[in-house]
Amino acid sequence: MEYFQNFNYHTHTYRCGHAGMYKTEEYVLTARDAGLKALGISDHCPVPALEFQDIKLRMHLKDAEEYISEINGLKEKYKDIEILSGFECEYDNMKAFFLSELRDKVDYLVLGQHFISDVKREGNSDYPTVYAHEVCAAMESGLFDMVAHPDIFMNYSDTFTHIEDQTKFMENARIASQMICEKAKELNIPLEINLHGTLENKGYPNKLFWEICEKVGTPVIYGVDAHDPKEFLSMRENMDKSEEKIGYANLNVLEYYNPVDFRNSNQVLQNKLRDTIKSAYTYEAMLANKTITNILNGLPEDLDKETLEYRINELLESEKRKLENSYAIKSRESTDESAFIARDNRLSYEEKLFYTSRIRAGLINLSETLRLRLSFINSLAEYVQKAIKAGAYSKAEIANIVMRQAEVNSTGDIESKIQQLEILNDFYKQKLEEGGAQKAGKLVKSNPLFGKLESDASPFLWSSDGFTNVMAVSMIIMFILGIGVGVAMMLLGM
């Protein structure tokens, strides 16, 4: 291969827990020595504070600022190579707002869909199309600038015991490949030929996928997916091996790519990102909705409100016990691993110190996450109590109110809070007219108000002190935003 790509935007550091113990600066220096003119550092992104972290896969949320700061320092130190900061992330609609916040802190985001929550990968003949739908949704979100190892689902093509299941998998693989390539071309998002997969002889890069990509004409780049600076030195060799492996001839390989420049010139992607941020709820709100919906789906429809509240609280307490058990298991595993590392004579003193220090920090973070999750569960119990007291009857209505209460308590967007409080006012007015808050209601399947709330794009929330306090809070916030005259007149009217 005569062509050599002089940029790379898929690079990891020691913070992910499964790369070498190399300083980030070593990646920069080795990339420069290998002839690269641009380097993006894109370590695996952290998860929200309410989610338990796996120290073998990614950095903790509290490490993100130091990670970004270090990269910014390297930008200033090395002017002869362009350096960009990024994260490699899995897409999850529950985390869309969280990912948008991460995106604001760095230059670009890489989509690396290693898994899909609650979906089995091995022995699942439908996995390719499930994966493709998630990847396409991720691209549609506007959050991501490139797709790493888009053919990674082919890693599971040989996990079947029955030939008919494997045949179905390959049929779905063809469909999935077509879906991903067409969506990437539509949005002008480059797909990555992953050189680390070639280096380690994985199921990707995959010939079928890239044959389809060639026919579609999707933009393509190479990604080192570096976990060791020396991988830059073998970049040209691995590009040649990839070409031999997948046998392409006329792929639409980009000779120049910069995710910042491409983003700035891609108005469609910018618009999609804006729409995603506008419609996304915080992770806390999404988790609240998921937790309460799962609980409500297991309850009968005809409970009176006192019994309903009792049963929900009972199941929330069960959720606490599950979290505590999960914490105990993870803590025990970490402690055992630390002891094993201490006895492992194959490791140097520096390696032992690095890994045990990381485990120790992980245990502290686990403890903090448990504390936050238990507090979160307590808040859900409070939200449920308020929802039922307010006159919410249907399961869907209760779940929506809980989600929106969690949203207003976790979002920093003042305009969103005002909008939600305005809808809350309408909610209270209608309930008061119906006498809903005074009824000893049953949990019924439908409620006329829910249809209105569901169709309204704005969330609805309320204050624990009732309608009057909600109005007062709304007025105070509007006053702060500069709507003083109108608020003053309303106060005088009251």
Image: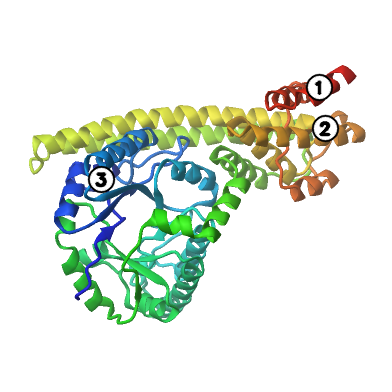
For disc 1, the marked residue is 468
Q: Earlier in the sequence, mark 2 or mark 3?
A: 3
Q: Say what amino acid the circle numbered 2 marks.
A: Tyr
- Assign a secondary structure to mark 1: helix
Which of discs 2 and 3 lies nearer the camera? The answer is 3
Left or right of 339? Residue 306 is right
Q: Could you say which disc has been placed on residue 3 in the image?
A: none
Q: Quadrant of the C terminus?
A: top right
Crowd class of label 2 (few under 14; some 14 to 19; many from 20; radius 10 Å): many
The image quarter in which residue 392 lies: top right
Q: Of label 1 and label 3, which has the lower sequence position?
A: 3
Q: Are marks 1 and 3 in contact (CB under 8 Å)?
A: no
Q: 243 or 49, which is in the foreground? A: 243
Sequence-first disc among 2 and 1 = 2
How far is disc 2 from disc 1 in space, using C-alphas? Answer: 10 Å
Q: Residue at x 65, y 39 (%)?
A: 403
- Looking at the rendered structure, the kind of residue marked 1 is Thr
> Of all residues shown, which one is farthest toward the front?
79
Q: CA distance from mark 2 to mark 3?
A: 52 Å
Q: Secondary structure at mark 3?
A: loop
Residue where numbered disc 3 is placed: 13
According to the picture, the residue beneath numbered tag 2 turns out to be 428
Residue 304 horizontal/vertical position (percent): 79, 36
Element at label 2: helix
